[in-house]
């Protein structure tokens, strides 16, 4: 399928590449432009819930923060390796996985990824729907869920360029929102007492690491879907793979 307009131009366009290979003449951008996309994706409600689980499961607040940081760094490194495949292959992550698993073998990880997508969609819709309903004073989460779901469908249909635009907006809103929450936390709570209230426990520390790593690893199956729009000659600090052809 052909895209409606060249990707490198400044005018908006509707995405039509879907799971297709992205030709070189439609590639554009730089690795730095991927920052707001993924930063914005992490500055959201579900990430807060994921991090809070470490404390809910018994981890000390200080060691939970350290464990989550380590986990995110480890998981992010693996995620980056997957992202490096995008410019080289120009294919979505799950399509390129046919090279490793084969055409029929790739069905197994694909099914698992679809289940993961459904889980993300369900939790994101419920949590965001509740937040939207509170903002709109709708009285029922169903209204917020419908609004959030409709916006998600629209942005996903419009595609890559609009997802990037939303990522930039989410980055700014996320920074402002979390800065405000941080200030409120520091001014209303005894943070020193909270951080020093518990003791180090290795099992819960490992749990915090796994929560952080798992959060980033779940982006792995589709991180190359966005980096595939970068030019094939995009430089990497250390190449993670050599070009291979999907069967």
Image (spheres, rainbow, N blue to C red):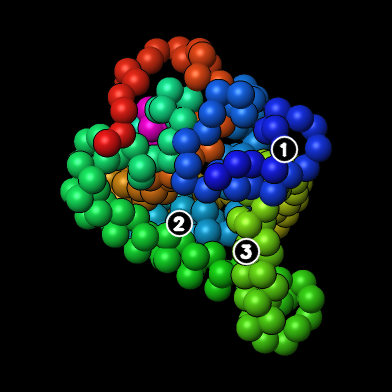
- Location of residue 237 with respect to 16 vertically, above or below: above
Q: Dot 1 corresponds to which residue? A: 5
> For this rendering, which residue is in front, 110 or 47?
110
In this rendering, position of residue 114 left or right of residue 226: left
CB under 8 Å between callouts 1 and 3? no
* CB under 8 Å between discs 2 and 3: no
Q: Nearer the viewer, mark 2 or mark 3?
A: 3
Q: x, y percentage for residue 25?
A: 61, 24
**Would residue 80 be counted in the magenta stretch?**
yes
Residue drawn at point x = 78 percent, y = 42 percent: 12
Q: Looking at the magenta stretch, what is its main secondary structure?
A: helix
* Closer to us: 90 or 49: 90
Earlier in the chain: of badge 1 and badge 2, it is 1
Q: Quadrant of residue 134?
A: bottom right
Please, is residue 18 above or below residue 238 in the view?
Answer: below
User: Residue under circle 2?
Assistant: 50
Per the rendered image, the range of residues in magenta is 79-84
Counting from the top left corner in percent of width and height, residue 51 is at 46, 53
Mark closer to the observer (1, 3): 1
Sooner in the amino-acid sequence: mark 2 or mark 3 = 2
Q: Which residue is mark 3?
A: 153
Q: Say few, some or many: other residues with alpha carbon within 10 Å of mark 3 (under 14 / 14 to 19 / 20 or more).
A: few
Nearer the observer, disc 1 or disc 2?
1
Q: Real-space Cα distance between discs 1 and 3?
A: 22 Å
User: Which residue is at a point 20% across and 42% down the rendered structure image?
Assistant: 102
Q: Secondary structure at mark 1?
A: loop
- Pick whichever of labels 1 and 3 is earlier in the sequence: 1
Q: Is residue 81 above or below residue 44?
A: above
Q: Position of residue 59 (x, y in %)?
A: 36, 53
Closer to the camera, 21 or 107?
21
Q: What distance separates the C-alpha of mark 1 from that of mark 2?
A: 39 Å
Classify 10 Å Cα crowding around label 1: few (below 14), some (14-19), many (20 and above): some
């Amino acid at each position: 399928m052909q895209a409606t307009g060249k990707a490198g131009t400044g005018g908006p366009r509707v995405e039509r590449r879907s799971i297709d290979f992205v030709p070189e003449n439609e590639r554009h951008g730089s690795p730095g432009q991927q920052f707001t996309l993924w930063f914005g994706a992490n500055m959201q409600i579900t990430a807060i819930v994921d991090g809070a689980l470490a404390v809910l499961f018994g981890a000390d607040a200080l060691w939970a923060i350290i464990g989550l940081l380590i986990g995110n760094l480890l998981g992010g490194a693996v995620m980056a390796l997957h992202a490096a495949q995008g410019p080289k292959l120009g294919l979505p992550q799950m399509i390129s996985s046919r090279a490793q698993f084969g055409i029929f073998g790739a069905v197994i990880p694909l099914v698992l990824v679809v289940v993961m997508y459904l889980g993300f969609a369900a939790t994101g819709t419920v949590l965001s729907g509740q937040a939207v309903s509170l903002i709109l004073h709708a009285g029922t989460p169903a209204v917020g869920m419908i609004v959030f779901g409709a916006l998600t469908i629209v942005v996903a249909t419009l595609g890559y360029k609009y997802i990037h635009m939303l990522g930039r907006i989410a980055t700014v809103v996320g920074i402002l929102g979390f800065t405000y929450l941080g200030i409120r936390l520091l001014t209303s709570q005894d943070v020193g007492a909270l951080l020093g209230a518990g003791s180090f426990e290795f099992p819960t520390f490992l749990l915090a690491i796994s929560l952080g790593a798992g959060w980033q690893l779940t982006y792995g199956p589709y991180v190359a879907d966005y980096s595939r729009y970068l030019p094939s000659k995009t430089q990497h600090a250390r190449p993670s793979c050599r070009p291979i052809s999907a069967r």
